[in-house]
Image (cartoon, rainbow, N blue to C red):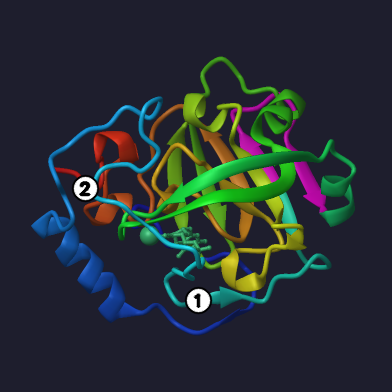
Amino acid sequence: MTDGIEESGFEKDGKIRDKLVATKEKWAREGRALTGEQADPSRERLPPGQRRVDDWPVLDLGITPRLDTGNWRLTVDGLVENPVGWRWADFQAQPQERFLSDIHCVTTWSRYDNHWEGVSARHLLSVVRPRPEARFVVCHSADGYTTNLPLDAFADEDVLLATTWEGEPISLDHGGPVRVIVPKLYFWKSAKWITRLELTADDHPGYWEVRGYHNEADPWKEERYSD
Ligand SMILES: Nc1nc2c(c(=O)[nH]1)N[C@H]1C(S)=C(S)[C@@H](COP(=O)(O)O)O[C@H]1N2
Ligand SMILES: [Mo]
């Protein structure tokens, strides 16, 4: 798999919005919304080129998997000492933690003060125990989407596998029953409908990363697109 979309084995509704994908690829080529500025997250809350919204837009490829807490599974495998295959009850049996973070989407909206609950990436890593060679995490989703992260970025203290937002279960539209949240990076790095986390030695650029989006995706450095 090199193009970031793959068979997931889950039933799905809808099909890839080719026009939307083409538009976003065009934006990447044109460098849309780039200001050329950088900002210091310890001094400013809104990254360069972003604007604040109060709603929470739904953005994805157009394929909604028929996932629920009954058929959802999470596999964590690859370069780990203790691979796991969790069902909902196994996931719920892990320590549940609360998080507060902002969302920054590359399409320029930011949403402050999102309250999440779920299992921290740190806890998950303490269970699976990455092997010394593990340096990257590939997030695989039930719609076939993938996105890649350095293991260090995934291991950050604010990263979680979220099951609730503002006290309610995360809706299917927003990636429920379980999605990844990586607050320090643009939101395309936060995989909805997560079903597999694969730890690897080499980097495997995901769906948007092979279509012109930046591999690192730090909003404070405006890493929207690759050059
Ligand atoms: N599985 C999956 N995760 C995904 C996507 C997707 O298409 N499929 N889109 C990404 C993008 S580009 C964004 S901006 C956010 C949007 O999440 P939201 O719909 O909850 O706002 O999800 C990210 N995670
Ligand atoms: Mo996005």
Vertical placement of 72 versus 213: above or below?
below
Q: Position of residue 102 (x, y in %)?
A: 50, 46
Quarter of the N terminus within the rendering? bottom left
**Crowd rating for badge 2 (residues with CA inside 10 Å; few <14, some 14–19, many 20+):** many
Residue 216 visible here: no
Read off the magenta span.
75-87
Q: Locate the C terminus and report the quarter of the image it occupies.
A: top left
Does the segment drawn in magenta span residue 114?
Answer: no
Residue 89 or residue 98, whichever sits in front = 98
Relative to 125, residue 187 above or below: below
- Identify which amino acid the numbered label 1 is placed on: Ile
Which quadrant of the figure shows ligand 2? bottom left
**Residue 52 at x, y percent in the picture:** 39, 56
Q: Position of residue 96 (x, y in %)?
A: 81, 40
Q: Residue at x 25, y 40 (%)?
A: 223
Element assignment for label 1: loop
Image check: 173 left or right of 108?
right
> What residue would you read off at disc 2?
225
x and y percentages locating residue 101 in the rendered image = 56, 42
The residue tagged 1 is 63
